[in-house]
Image: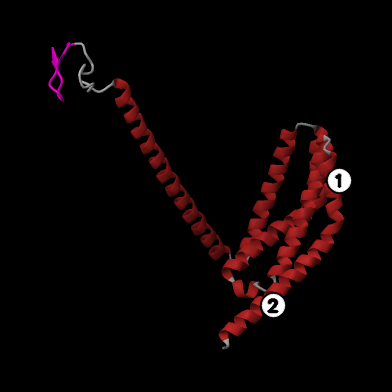
């Protein structure tokens, strides 16, 4: 016989619950397993989030430390070295993408694009590296040059991207991509001028605002 610990009623030995009050004599296996699983799952999620945060923090810190060391060590030569590494990476990436693309015609078109615009790619990588270096090391001196660098980088990047889109659209037969890219390309000089004018306009406005704040 089993005695209910809650109401004291006698029950059969094989009973799992009290026949009077319904209280369980022992914990159901399913209930304990589900509770344990939920606890393990919550712990795993929390641990995963903590590991992810720690990895991101370490990655950011290491990246900043390396960037600072690179700029301090090579000075004004740092943008040029970054340009060389970036250009080599671009060549490798285009070759790999052309290989994945799978057609000799597509690969040849990419190689021709690279051959035609390698100077543009080199200039874009240099402008990006130079702008990043000057913005961190000589921000005040870089401010008057920033609009030109930004406008030139934007127009050059869009030109190369549009040429790339034309090749991709022609290879896969997507005429919309080809037509859209060919429509944008003639407008790029106008876009360069507009971005340049707006950039210098904001530089002048911010300079006037700073001077007015300094001089009450």
- Secondary structure mostly seen in magenta is loop
Camera-nearest residue between 130 and 139 = 139
Going from N to C along the chain, the mark reached first, 2 or 1, is 1
> Few, some or many C-alpha atoms within 10 Å of disc 2 (few <14, some 14-19, many ≥20)?
few
Residue 99, image quadrant: top right
Q: Residue at x 72, y 40 (%)?
A: 95
- Which residue is denoted by mark 1 in the rendering? 179
Residue 31, image quadrant: top left
Q: In this view, does 83 lie above or below 112?
A: below
Which quarter of the figure is the N terminus placed in?
Answer: top left
Q: Image check: 138 left or right of 125? A: left
Residue at the outermost bottom position = 216
Instruction: Kindly identify which numbered label has been placed on residue 55.
Output: none
Q: Mark 2: which secondary structure?
A: helix
Q: Residue at x 43, y 44 (%)?
A: 49
Q: Image check: 23 left or right of 63? A: left
Which quarter of the figure is the C terminus placed in?
Answer: bottom right
Q: Which residue is drawn at 52% across and 62% down?
A: 68
Q: Residue at x 54, y 59 (%)?
A: 67
Q: Image check: 141 left or right of 175? A: left
Instruction: Kindly identify which numbered label has been placed on residue 204.
Output: 2
Taking the magenta stretch, the answer to whether it contains residue 5 is: yes
Residue 21, image quadrant: top left
For the record, the magenta segment spans 1-13
């Amino acid at each position: 016989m089993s005695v209910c610990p809650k109401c004291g009623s006698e029950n059969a030995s094989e009973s799992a619950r009290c026949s009077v009050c319904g209280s369980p004599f022992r914990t159901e296996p399913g209930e304990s397993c589900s509770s344990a699983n939920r606890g393990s799952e919550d712990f795993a999620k929390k641990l995963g989030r903590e590991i992810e945060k720690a990895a991101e923090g370490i990655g950011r810190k290491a990246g900043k430390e390396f960037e600072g060391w690179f700029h301090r060590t090579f000075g004004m030569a740092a943008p040029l070295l970054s340009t060389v590494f970036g250009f080599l990476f671009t060549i490798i990436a285009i070759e790999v993408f052309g290989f994945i693309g799978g057609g000799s015609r597509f690969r040849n078109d990419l190689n021709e694009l690279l051959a035609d615009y390698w100077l543009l790619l080199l200039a874009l990588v240099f402008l990006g590296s130079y702008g990043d270096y000057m913005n961190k090391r000589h921000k005040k001196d870089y401010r008057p040059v920033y609009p030109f660098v930004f406008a030139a980088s934007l127009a050059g990047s869009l030109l190369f991207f549009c040429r790339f889109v034309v090749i991709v659209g022609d290879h896969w037969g997507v005429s919309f991509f080809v037509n859209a890219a060919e429509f944008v390309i003639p407008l790029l000089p106008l876009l360069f001028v507009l971005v340049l004018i707006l950039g210098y306009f904001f530089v002048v406005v911010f300079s006037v605002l700073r001077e007015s704040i300094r001089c009450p």
